[in-house]
Image (cartoon, rainbow, N blue to C red):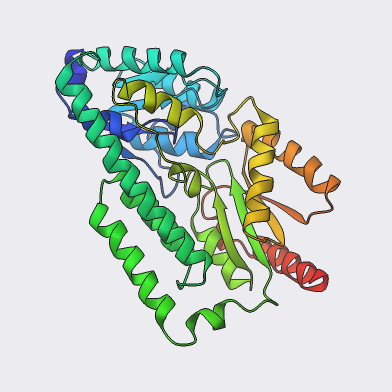
């Protein structure tokens, strides 16, 4: 306990970990987005291992900050095992939407570990206010997303930038991105130049995505992105929490379990249905699935999405890689070929 209370910084590894909880408890939380795999802690994990897990370990090994892990996958459990004697905590997040009570109990245990009484009146009031604040930030990001889908932006990378601001509690910077895209949307000819019906529309899906440069690679290949189904994209913000005044912690638990599902879920039918709705609502022509090397969760997820794509005769491209995947010439060739096949269909 004393270790935790000496430092008010919390590192998060998963979109199922609610930043509003830590803000209400007086901690500074942030989602870590490694730019690559460093050297620290490399002897603790094998090289044929999830690149995000290895990169996360490299960032937090030896840190005095608390690293908070969700039971996202076996790889992240191993990272937690490697740090268990340091500043680390494993939060059990249910893999189904039907267990909000269990998730609330786990959040209460975490708060107790942090030295916070979950029943404390002041804490509950702070949690209510922070849920409202994060709902507002999520609304801002939803507007940014809508503007980008409408063609108001030089790149869908702005959404990744916005998600990073979200985890940094940078409300003003998120609002600035929204305003900038709205201004561009109003510029004469801008939308028409970016809404050419001949340009294939695609959604990028992934467990984490890892390398945001993949977005620019896809756009430079002549495709138009209309969705980013990743925790580096929409799965971190495309939801709202229905706040119950009598129990904000229950509202938080229920809201996060029912947010857009990721590959960690044990409800594959729900996951596939959500992707199908995304494809239909965005009028997408194809889906690009990025699978980080050695990512078991993505492998299971892709299996179900591939089966659905075959049943519906929907174009699907699988690409695989680690960090810096967006700089791969081979990947560029495959995406260009995918664009050409979509153009023939259109």
Residue 225, placed above or below residue 205: below
Residue at 17% across, 27% down: 7
Position of 270 compared to 326: left or right?
right
Position of 179 compared to 319: left or right?
left
Locate residue 23, reporting x and y percent: 23, 33
Residue 271, placed above or below residue 311: above
Residue 160, placed above or below residue 276: below
Q: Residue furthest bottom?
A: 188
Of residue 133 and residue 272, the one placed in the foreground of this image is: 133
Report the number of numbered marks.
Answer: 0
Residue at 65% across, 27% down: 267
- The answer to whether one can see residue 65 in this image is no
Position of 311 compared to 203: left or right?
right
Of residue 344 and residue 33, the one placed in the foreground of this image is: 344
Locate residue 176, reporting x and y percent: 28, 64
Q: Quadrant of residue 241?
A: top left
Question: Which quadrant of the figure contains the C terminus?
Answer: bottom right
Residue at 41% across, 80% down: 186
Locate residue 132, reporting x and y percent: 28, 39
Q: Quadrant of residue 245?
A: top left
- The answer to whether one can see residue 15 in this image is yes
Question: Which quadrant of the figure contains the N terminus?
Answer: top left
Locate residue 119, reporting x and y percent: 23, 13
Of residue 25 and residue 133, the one placed in the foreground of this image is: 133
């Amino acid at each position: 306990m004393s270790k935790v209370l000496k430092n008010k910084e919390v590192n998060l590894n998963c979109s199922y970990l609610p930043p509003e909880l830590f803000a209400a408890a007086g901690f500074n939380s942030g989602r870590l987005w490694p730019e690559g795999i460093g050297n620290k802690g490399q002897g603790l994990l094998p090289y044929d291992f999830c690149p995000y897990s290895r990169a996360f370990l490299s960032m937090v090994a030896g840190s005095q900050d608390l690293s908070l892990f969700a039971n996202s996958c076996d790889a992240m459990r191993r990272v937690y095992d490697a740090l268990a004697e340091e500043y680390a905590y494993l939060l059990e997040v249910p893999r189904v939407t039907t267990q909000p009570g269990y998730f609330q109990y786990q959040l209460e245990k975490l708060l107790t570990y942090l030295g916070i009484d979950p029943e404390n009146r002041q804490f509950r009031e702070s949690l209510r206010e922070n849920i409202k604040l994060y709902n507002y930030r999520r609304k801002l990001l939803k507007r940014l997303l809508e503007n980008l889908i409408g063609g108001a932006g030089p790149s869908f990378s702005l959404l990744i930038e916005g998600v990073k601001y979200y985890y940094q509690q940078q409300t003003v910077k998120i609002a600035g991105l929204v305003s900038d895209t709205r201004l561009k949307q109003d510029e004469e000819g801008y939308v028409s130049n970016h809404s050419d019906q001949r340009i294939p529309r695609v959604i990028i899906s992934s467990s984490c995505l890892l390398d945001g440069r993949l977005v620019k690679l896809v756009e430079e290949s002549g495709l138009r992105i209309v969705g980013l189904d990743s925790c580096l994209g929409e799965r971190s913000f495309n939801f709202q929490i229905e706040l119950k005044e009598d129990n904000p912690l229950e509202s938080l638990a229920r809201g996060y379990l029912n947010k857009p599902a990721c590959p960690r879920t044990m409800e594959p039918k729900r996951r596939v249905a959500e992707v199908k709705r995304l494809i239909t609502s965005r009028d997408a022509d194809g889906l690009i699935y990025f699978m980080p090397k050695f990512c078991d969760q993505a492998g299971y997820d892709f299996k179900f999405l591939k089966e659905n794509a075959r049943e519906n005769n929907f174009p699907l491209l699988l690409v695989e890689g680690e960090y810096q995947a967006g700089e791969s010439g081979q990947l560029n060739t495959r995406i260009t070929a995918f664009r050409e096949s979509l153009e023939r269909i259109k």
